[in-house]
Image (cartoon, grey):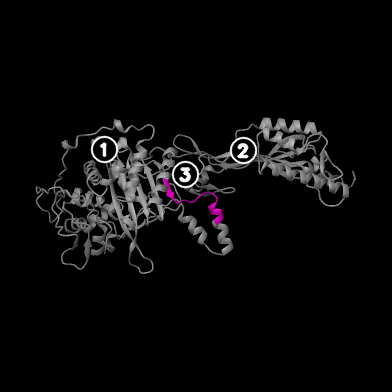
Amino acid sequence: MQLFQRDYYRGVQVEAQSRISHGGEKRGRILDRNDQPMAMDREIHRLAIDPDHLSHCFELNLQDQIQPKKLSVEAIIQKLENSGIQFLSDRQVLIEELSADIQHSLKVRRNGKGNRIRYRRLGDLAPDAKRGILDQSLSEISRELGKWVFPKVETEMVRFYPFGTVGSTLIGEKGRSEGLWGMESQFNPTLRKVKSLVKEQMAPGGKKMAPNREAIPGQQGTDVHTTIDMTLQAELEHLCFENYQRASARSVSAMVVDPFTGETLAMATVPGLQRGQMTEFANQDLINGSREGMETAYGLMARLQRVSLEPGSVVKPLILARALELGIPLDLPLAVRSKNQRIDGRRRLFRDSSLLKEKTPEGAVVFSSNIGMVLLGVKHMKKSDVESILRRFGFGSKTGIELPGEEFGQLKPLSKWNRFSWESACYGYEMMVTPVQVLRAYMAIANGGYLLEPTLLKKSQDSPAPIILSEKVAAECRRVLGRAVSDGTGRHIVHHVSPELRELIREGKLQMAGKTGTTKLMDPETGLYSEDKYNSSFVGFAPVDNARFLTVVLVEEPTPEDNMYYASKSAAPLGAQILSAAMNLPGFNPFSVAYDDPRDSEPLILATHESADNLSPSGSQVEPARDSGQEGEPDRW
């Protein structure tokens, strides 16, 4: 054998003595803005036992019941429990199963027939327990038994989410090696780890015979520092869930950002995809031979960047911004004669839910009048003015937010606009935008004219953001949006903030700004707008000047009962609650907000631009409407 088969048996020996194991490299962590881990790798120590080896420490009595020679099964389990092992099954059930394994192995050894049981997994070491204490306990048990009955403790890295289900729709989930969806998928190239491969030469008893050799070097994953505030995230999800139930909606989504930095503080969709569901949906599709499960999963992911819809009345302040640039006075009289009106004798009929009494561009935005906005956009502005301002605010282009599946939306080129498109665009139809695009546009109003990209990452601005509005125009838009909350379609939201903030608002020390939007949904079967399906939205920020927080809310298909589909009843109250929660975060004191006496400010009157035709004298004044019942939605064609 030494002469002729030496190489063969040496190979057999090396193979028998070799062990291959992976290193302890970890996937990068996902951290919130306060550096709290939202996702991290955690070592799991898994313990098993060899019932066949353990059976040598027992014997069978005349009734074929096992009798311990030294330690009983109950004593072994108790010692393991004291060392921090969390068992996979109930303690008593585990004792009965392990006893049955020992009994089986003893019978096999006595009868010489059958296979002995060589492995049973017991459980994992608790997260707060110490590995050293477990190793000491295993040594003590083996010493008392006179035999080592435990296979090597397996150490494995598992993905751990310290906040549980909070933020799961946003954070996503890691599969066996890669992120499946959410941040785990988006930031996978950064988070990914490379496992090192280590070869060991071990004796049969487990003693190391030679130094380890690292066959493949490993690499640790890199941490991702996000802008998410998990305190606000938890509150946002709670508020969205409450509103989802109250409005009996198909889905409720919301997002909070800092309008001066673009940093996303929280983002939620309810109901949202939970960890483990994607695998379940994929298995369903495999069984059924369809894609219905995965389509359902995609519908439950974060929606604000991946759903394109007609925005409705939230577009009206953007049109107003262009009117201000053209020098159109905010108190320009508009020929709104009724709540159902045709323009220039054309067949198309425009509707408002009530008669606009403050018949001016400012009143049309504050009280959300479709007729007023069409008169402003068609009679006093050019088609190119309407199209250009929407494109300047970023409609039709991605925001760049770091989440999978962002859509471009759709804004037709000016060459394809007709009179119908022109009129419809004035109050948010004939275009498709994502809620995140709307949020980006409103950030420019809130921060003084800078078009920022919303982001989930802590990073410095590499280049200055483009300025799309003058500070004067942005300030005037903020004032009008403040009136929309205090006097117009969002006036009821004061009832949904905390008592302390409500008092500050009533005293004039704190002011919120915002705009509601209610849009009909297209019926895919008829190609016409549905009479009972709507989307409701709200965009708001606070305080009005030097805003700290801006939110966008989307309530999809709320119940039509009790007029719940109106944004003023569904989306706007939720927006107020979100802003209230944000202003109660640690580090922000709403009582220290600087404010001006509203009696000291007057509406800004800009010089008339030469391209604005059909203007009435700028000095005409209109008495503010005392009836604040104007909603302006839903539009009926």
Residue on which the image places disc 1? 505
Image x and y of residue 330, in percent: 16, 48
Q: Is residue 273 magenta?
A: yes
Mark 2: few/some/many CA within 10 Å (<14, 14-19, 20+): some
Q: Choose mark 3 or mark 2, whichever is in front.
A: 3
Name which of mark 3 and mark 1 comes first in the sequence.
3
Q: What residue span does the magenta drawing correspond to?
A: 267-280
Mark 3 falls on what kind of element?
Answer: loop
Tell me the kind of residue under disc 2.
Answer: Glu
Tell me the kind of residue under disc 3.
Answer: Gly
Tell me the kind of residue under disc 1.
Answer: Ile
Q: Is residue 614 above or below residue 210?
A: below
Residue on which the image places disc 3? 167
Mark 1 falls on what kind of element?
Answer: helix
Residue on which the image places disc 2? 43
Q: Quadrant of the N terminus?
A: top right
Left-right relation of 392 to 232? left
